[in-house]
Image (cartoon, grey):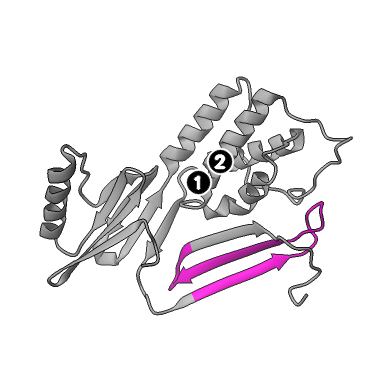
Amino acid sequence: RYDPCVYNKRVKDDVITIRVHVDDLKISARSKKSLEDTIKDLQRIYGEITVHWGPEYDYLGMMITTYPEQKKITLSMSGYVKGCLEEFEQDNGGQIIKVVTTPATENLFRVRSRGEAIMLSKTKAASFHSTVAKLLFLAKRGRPDILLAVSFLTTRVQSPDEDDWKKLVRILGYLKGTMEYDLTISCNSLETLTWYIDGSYAVHEDMKGQSGAVLMIGESTILSRSNKQKVNTRSSTE
């Protein structure tokens, strides 16, 4: 009832769940027979469909590996990261991406005035916009460690300048050195939900702030957010 892209069906003592992303489905159930019956029903309606089974499968650029006995999964997007890097280098011949240890510096929110900024060419700006969109997909799923930097760059896609380009290249350099980082989600406790929330104030050029939040179930992060605040305030109290 809360998510129009998730369907649940009860069959005796089992619950079959289907998650939909355009034409990709991720189906789970307690028993293998329930899965097989669901797939047969889908094949009867839609004809030939591609099915991936097993403890490891690729879904929307995420390589998901399940460990049932340990009640955990690992989510790897190293292939997606590699594709982003290769495409960026191909589209911007000669662009050198050096490995760095952090996705951003303390200058992340600093923006030059219109008179001082060197704006990107139309072609370069299009590449900037496309790459930021790809990194946002990555940050919201398997790499929350780049979310803050990517969140800021999404506010710059309309009129990016050379400084924004350097910040984008830095994120790519960080990803290049941490390509094998995986996100681990375990199921040690479903009864404890914990939010961590923080904010910085007047850090952007228009004096707006930045808010960040992480939702955890037990020891696992299942949701991360980083957003520019919509109103000007000087403190959380205000």
Direction from residue 7 to residue 218 in the image, left or right: right
Q: Is residue 175 shown above or below 214?
A: above
Write the residue at 77% across / 30% down. 119
Secondary element at image label 2: helix
Q: Nearer the viewer, residue 183 or 5?
A: 5
Query: Residue 15 at what x, y percent from top left?
Result: 21, 67
Q: Quadrant of residue 201?
A: bottom right
Secondary element at image label 1: helix
Residue located farthest toward the top when viewing the structure as drawn: 93
Kind of residue at disc 1: Phe
Instruction: Rate crowding at label 1 as few (under 14), some (14 to 19) or many (20 or more) other CA atoms within 10 Å.
Output: some
Write the residue at 29% across / 52% down. 26
Write the residue at 51% across / 28% down. 87
Q: Are marks 2 and 1 in contact (CB under 8 Å)?
A: yes
Write the residue at 50% across / 75% down. 194
Kind of residue at disc 2: Ala
Query: Residue 154 at what x, y percent from top left?
Result: 64, 45
Direction from residue 143 to residue 208 in the image, left or right: right
| Residue 98 visible at all | no
The answer to if 170 sits in the magenta stretch is no
Q: Quadrant of the C terminus?
A: bottom right
Q: Which residue is mark 1?
A: 137
Residue located farthest toward the right when viewing the structure as drawn: 115
Q: Residues in magenta?
A: 194-222
Q: Is residue 109 shown above or below 133?
A: below
Query: Principal SS element in the magenta part?
Result: strand
Instruction: Rate crowding at label 2 as few (under 14), some (14 to 19) or many (20 or more) other CA atoms within 10 Å.
Output: some
Residue located farthest toward the bottom when viewing the structure as drawn: 191
Query: Residue 117 at what x, y percent from top left?
Result: 83, 35
Label disc, if present, on residue 133 of the rendered structure:
2
